[in-house]
Image (spheres, grey):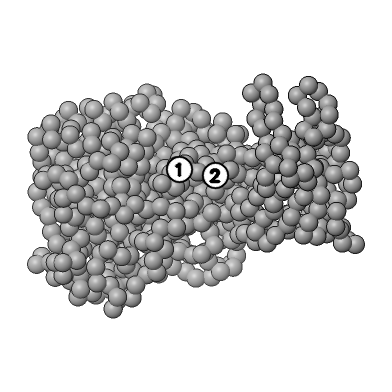
Amino acid sequence: MEMQSDHEVALSSTLFLDGVGEVVVQLSSDGLSCSPVDSDAITNYCLGVRSYLAKETKISFSDVYAIEPKEWGSIYDPSVAGTFLHGDHVEMHRFAVHGVVRPKKQPAPWILSEYIFGHKDLNTCEAWVRQLNSCTSNQYRRPKKLLVLVHPLCGKGKGLKTWETVAPVFSQAKVETKVIVTERAGHAYDVVSTLPDRELRSLDGIVTVGGDGLFNEVLNGLLSSRHKASYPPPPTGLAQNGDNYQNQQINITVNADDTSHTSADEGNSSPETSCRNDDNEPLLSTSQPAGSRVSNLGTQYRVNRPGDSADGPSVSFPNDWFRLGLIPAGSTDAIVLSTTGVRDPVTSALHIILGSKMSLDIAQVVRWKTSPSSVMDSPTLRYAASFAGYGFYGDVIKESEKLRWMGPVRYDYAGTMVFLKHKTYEAEVTYLEPQNINSSSHIPRRKRQKQICRTNCMVCNQPTPSESDRESLDGAVNKSDIYTDRDFKWSKLKGRFLSIGAAVISCRNERAPDGLVADAHLSDGFLHLILVKDCPRPHYLWHLTQLTKRGSDPLNYSFIEHRKTPAFTFVSQHDRSLWNLDGEALQACQVSVQACRGLVNLFASGPEV
């Protein structure tokens, strides 16, 4: 073994590897490799025990999440004569390298692996531990401190059990976690929205252990007072002839005092998702309102918030350093499936620990009116990470709230009941699209080649184009002033609809393996607007069944309008217009929705497909 005077390991040493025997370990800038000393030896086990072939094993630092010393113990050396299985155990000092194996066939869960090395000299083992820890901690931007919010009753009550499964992995990786178990609906929102900026800056991110509803609650708590951007225009601010939005901008200041509070109704608290609610939302009630309210009405709403506070510079979004993580334990876990490709708590935990990072679009939803009979309300702001739906989707969430005692199966039952009712709603939808018909956002009704979002996606990694480069909807856009851009126009669709949906991501789940929109991207700055017009019940059933089939095209029907747009508005005259935002209810008859490109970062790398 080659050692420096301070016991720092040189580029090559001879160690023992458990199950292999004596190996030459070589250290490089991106990992370490292990080769048996006897390069011609082949070790075979019998009675079904696996074999170790004499070849080089490479361990990349990008796949190593922990290095830890172990107590004096045995290393199995197959080359030493021992039992009839050939080999024996040798006592020595040891250390472990914990890593991950990524299966070649994707998508598939990542597998935890452990390499146990040994040497007779304690200083040698300690030096290796120091050197490897230095390599893994300095080379990669991995989290050191996280806030973890656990929903104990999500799914089938598996939230706490899921966290107990992955918590030891965080401990091994020496990631400090502050764990809060939610106790009521709105608890996570209250925690995150009132978190001082000084404490928020001390964190590398926030992790949720639960379903999409808990993530939505944390997302809204994080962004409600920290996202500094213009609102999309209200429906009443758009010219009737489809011309560009030309009204003046009015500045509005939002402070904590602008937020109204209602008392919590613990009897109606949701056991699976935590939902914010205001006085006009009857389904769920919490101690926190549905979002930030602004008191003055204008046209293009720009929110001005205070800058630096007593505890230092304010935290705003988007930013480059803060990340959100999801460990799946919910009923559908569409966000996890769409961003990692698998619904596996260990895989999601490893993405977090290894410091994976990707940007995610967020839908900003502004409610202008609750019901047609009400006067113009103070705008209410909400955010959605996966989907915003009306009609069928809103009715399903309404019915399922009455059936929480049924557990996750309530969604199937509620969906069936709503489908049999076959209700349609009169609505008007105005959406933004290019002036040039050749680059229209309209998705043609023919078999088209789909560009699926995946790890290192070229579309999502494409830099935001400038105004002069913005020629079509095939690339990503920045909507900083897209509402006054002469290259874009507002188009209108009016009629009776069974459902209106806006997919931010593909919305994959176990029932819909390709999702609602298979080629929706995670960070391209667009929403997929899907309008299902009034049609016979068998036609709608056929559309729904196509969602369950991999490789199908469930949107390729004459009664479905599919538009790719950065923003749209919605107006309905129905008294109980209900929207479904990531599984959370919002009553609204006038809304504006825009895609905020890359508004948050996730501990993820995109789906492995």
Q: Which residue is mark 2?
A: 102
Number of residues whose C-alpha sits closer than 10 Å to that of mark 1, classed few (under 14), some (14–19) or many (20 or more): few
| Residue furthest front as drawn | 40
Q: Residue at x 9, y 67 (%)?
A: 241
Q: Which residue is mark 1?
A: 106
Please give left or right for residue 554 compared with residue 79 in the image.
left
Q: Residue at x 21, y 31 (%)?
A: 418
Number of residues whose C-alpha sits closer than 10 Å to that of mark 2, classed few (under 14), some (14–19) or many (20 or more): some
Please tell me whether residue 126 is drawn above or below residue 492 in the rendered image.
above
In the image, residue 262 lies at what x, y percent? 40, 45
- Let me know if residue 604 appears in the view: yes
- Let me know if residue 578 appears in the view: no
Q: Nearer the viewer, residue 440 or 582?
A: 440
Q: Secondary structure at mark 2?
A: loop
Label 2 sits on what residue type? Arg
Q: Residue at x 48, y 53 (%)?
A: 605
Q: Secondary structure at mark 1?
A: loop
Please tell me whether residue 271 is drawn above or below residue 317 in the rendered image.
above
